[in-house]
Amino acid sequence: MKAIAIKEFGSTANFFEEQRDIPQPRAGEVLMRIRAGSINPIDYKIRGGRFGGNLPLVMGHDAAGVVVAVGSGVSRLGVGDEVWAYLGGPCSNGAYAEYASIPQEFVTARPRILSFEEAASVPVAGLTANESIRLKARPTPHHSVFIAGGAGGLGSAAIQILQMIGVARIVTTSGREASTRFIVDQLRLSPEQVIDYRDKGLKQLTQEAIAANGGAFFDKTLDFVGGEMKRLCFELVDFDGDIVSTVEEFDPFAVPVWHGRASPLFRKSASLHFHLLGARGLYGARETWAGYTQQLHELAFLYEAQRLWPVGVQDIGELSVETIRRGHEMLEAGGIQGKLVFSVP
């Protein structure tokens, strides 16, 4: 089979095409013929060596395709099933390939309402947004929520889930006119709910976000960007509020997690709930994997019922070294609205 791998950590020049044997599914695994995959920010961080890994390495965490073989003990899925998968556990290889063998817990039937490319855009962003909101922050329709990074794949999924559960007081950030238009046109927020962060310091951003929330601190803040945006989330959260971040920092003290706020806005920090979502699947005990099956089933149901919808899915071409390089470079440059996907002919 064809796979796009890296031979060493570093730049996109390290991608190369190689031929590998088609993996055989072990007990409890399904072999998927991949029809589409997506590229996520975590991919270029892995490429850079931030999380290590055995080289040569085939990356990619999202995939949609067709089951072509199953291992012993698999009864829920069969040959010919059209599926989507989260390739975050101990699979044979990542999604930048024609085939992958994956533990059945990370694979479910794809929503038939979505194309393979649309389906491949969902698992990482959908699972992460669902866990951030419904399992960690747990907002109700009465709560206000601030989102750092609303136009990306994760942010756009989060906004949809918040709207689905009835949260109306949502404020998010944008750094480009195109991102603001995307949030307003595709995600149905008003322009007043979008804060342009360009050329503004932390104090001004804090003031503008609070003003957009009717002069009040936020009950929940979601950080999908890190760095200064994580600091902003700490500034904005109210007493006894929740901060959920999906971004680890190189400097563990880059944000005031362990000590009180230094500014008057930090006066209520005595009771904060900070959740940092770590690596999935690969580091979880096998008995926890069924949770991924359940969440993928729930996401499929919500897409089939059109409670959630695909937005900003950009097909950047067929699986090749050039396509994968371009996708990484586009993400690293910033300003992407929605998700980048590739097809596998």
Image: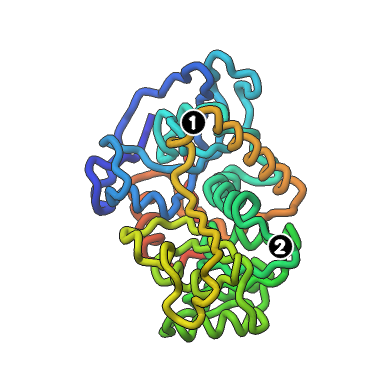
- Looking at the image, residue 239 sits to the left or right of residue 112; the answer is left
Residue 253 in sight here: yes
Residue under the image location 49 percent in, 58 percent down: 245
Q: Amino acid at mark 2?
A: Gln
Among numbered discs 1 and 2, the one appearing first in the sequence: 2
**Image spot of residue 92 (x, y percent):** 41, 28
Residue 314 in sight here: no
Question: Residue reaching furthest front?
Answer: 270
Q: Amino acid at mark 1?
A: Ala
Name the residue tied to disc 2: 163
Q: Nearer the viewer, residue 81 or 318?
A: 81
The mark found on residue 285 in the picture is 1
Task: Count residues near mark 2 (Cα–Cα under 10 Å), then give few for <14, some for 14-19, many for 20+.
Answer: some
**Image spot of residue 61 (x, y percent):** 46, 42
Q: Nearer the viewer, residue 102 or 163?
A: 163
Residue under the image location 48 percent in, 86 percent down: 204
Answer above or below: position of 102 versus 345: above
Residue under the image location 49 percent in, 61 percent down: 224
Secondary-structure class at tag 2 = helix
**Image spot of residue 48 (x, y percent):** 28, 51
**Image spot of residue 68 (x, y percent):** 54, 23
The mark found on residue 276 in the picture is none
Occupied quadrant, residue 167: bottom right
Residue at mark 1 to residue at mark 2: CA–CA distance: 32 Å
Occupied quadrant, residue 105: top right
Q: Nearer the viewer, residue 222 or 317?
A: 222
Residue under the image location 58 percent in, 15 percent down: 73
